[in-house]
Image (cartoon, rainbow, N blue to C red):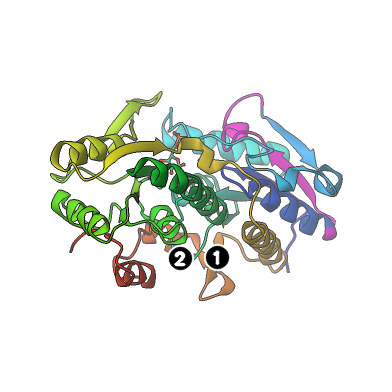
Amino acid sequence: MSNIKKIGILTSGGDCAGLNAVIMSVVNAASQQGWEIYGIHDGTDGLTNRPLSYEILTESNFSCSPWPRLAGSYLGSLNTGVKESQEVLAKRFGEGVRELGLDAVLVVGGDGSMNIVSTYCKMAGVKMIGIPKTIDNDTPLTEFSVGFNTACQICTNALDDLVTTARSHHRALILEVMGRDAGHLAMHSAIAGFADICLVPEIPYTLQGIINKLEAVKKSGRTSALIVVSEGVKTEKGEAVTSSVNLVGEKINGGIGDYLSNLINANYKGFQTRVTKLGHVQRSGNPTSFDRGLAVVLGAEAVRLLTEGHTDRMVALSKGKVTSFSLEEVVAAGTTGLDANSEYVKAARAIGMYVGEF
Ligand code: F6P
């Protein structure tokens, strides 16, 4: 049993659909326990900046409200990199938690946030529970993170929309999707959207392999093709393709679709190519029923763990069951990319999709 009376909840890292459903689930489940819930604004900034930035959340914020049905984060989320030393931020984080009298902090985040915030919590002696979210689906030890399914649906819808114009103009249309260094979003969407080619960071490809597939499509009598490429795919020589830099000077992925388009056009005349870069639309949309369900289940499990006195764990979906792992295990596991031997990749190959070469 636990002595929890007051908890904080924050969303950290890139936003996605389903965050508000997680917040709703946590608020409602914690309210059943009679706990007070503090919603921390803008990720860890709400606790590390002064004045502290937060609001008290109750069931009335979310019940019978549009919020859990919307993407984005009601609380705000930041993805801007660390501006000060870990020691300074952890100290301020801990002081903020103590000033508010929080007994534990629930962190809705991806692999990076689990790492960064759990380090602050450890250094500052704060109890934490993590809840995985990300459109990249690369948070370790969970089969699915909140937001991934909705992003897959958005990419699949884009392929459904592109197929008609591809057919009218006899083109090979390239869809560049997000995913950072993981190919889950690209592969799941390419399969659901019946693409001909899917390139992911985990599997090397060759220009000749792409051309061979396009040529096979042409020989079959088909006059159009769909190509999905993950933003983290590199050039054939292994160079990263980036489009710009962020506020702290880190390079931002983007542009591999244009790179491939130019390369294909220069070396193969069978199809004209065009590129669609979906960008941040992938982090929007009303969460799918799967993401809403996952959000509610993981949020409720996070609160249940606290009621039983467990802390410093991340809730997860593993082998179809709701479970949890220690934050130490999660951080040690790092990031989970697409398994090049997964059933998804095997199925893609089996149906003739070009997914690169080993
Ligand atoms: O991690 C989620 C994600 O959407 C990645 O897929 C993408 O590379 C990145 O965030 C974009 O981040 P930002 O919003 O900072 O450009």
36 within the magenta span: yes
Secondary element type, mark 2: loop
> What residue type is disc 2 on?
Leu
Taking the image as shown, residue 66 lies to the left or right of residue 340, namely: right
Residue shown at 40% from the left, 56% from the top = 190
**Relative vertical location of residue 349 with respect to residue 112 in this rendering, above or below:** below
Residue in the image at 45% along x and 36% along y:
279
The dot on residue 139 is none
- Find the distance from the CA under tag 1 to the CA under tag 2: 7 Å
Tell me the residue at 46%/31% (across/down): 80
Asked if residue 178 can be seen in this view, the reply is: no
Q: Is mark 1 within 8 Å of ligand 1?
A: no
Q: Is residue 21 above or below residue 143?
A: above
Residue 28 position within the rendered picture, expressed as x and y whole percent measured from the top left: 80, 55
- CB under 8 Å between callouts 1 and 2? yes
What residue is disc 2 on?
A: 141
Residues 80 and 277: in front is 277
Q: Quadrant of ligand 1?
A: top left
- Tell me where residue 358 appears, x and y as whole percent: 18, 64
Q: Is residue 159 left or right of residue 286?
A: left
Which span of residues is magenta-colored? 32-51
With 31 as the anchor, is 53 left or right in this view?
left
Query: Which residue lies under the disc numbered 1?
Result: 316
Image-quadrant location for residue 256:
top left
Name the residue type under label 1.
Ala
Q: Quadrant of the N terminus?
A: bottom right
Magenta span has 274?
A: no
| Most foreground residue, 243 or 351 | 351
For marks 1 and 2 on the same chain, the one whose residue lies earlier in the sequence: 2
Q: Percent position (x, y) of residue 311?
A: 60, 61
In the depicted structure, whether residue 84 falls above or below residue 344:
above
**Front residue of this view, candidates 186 and 17:** 186
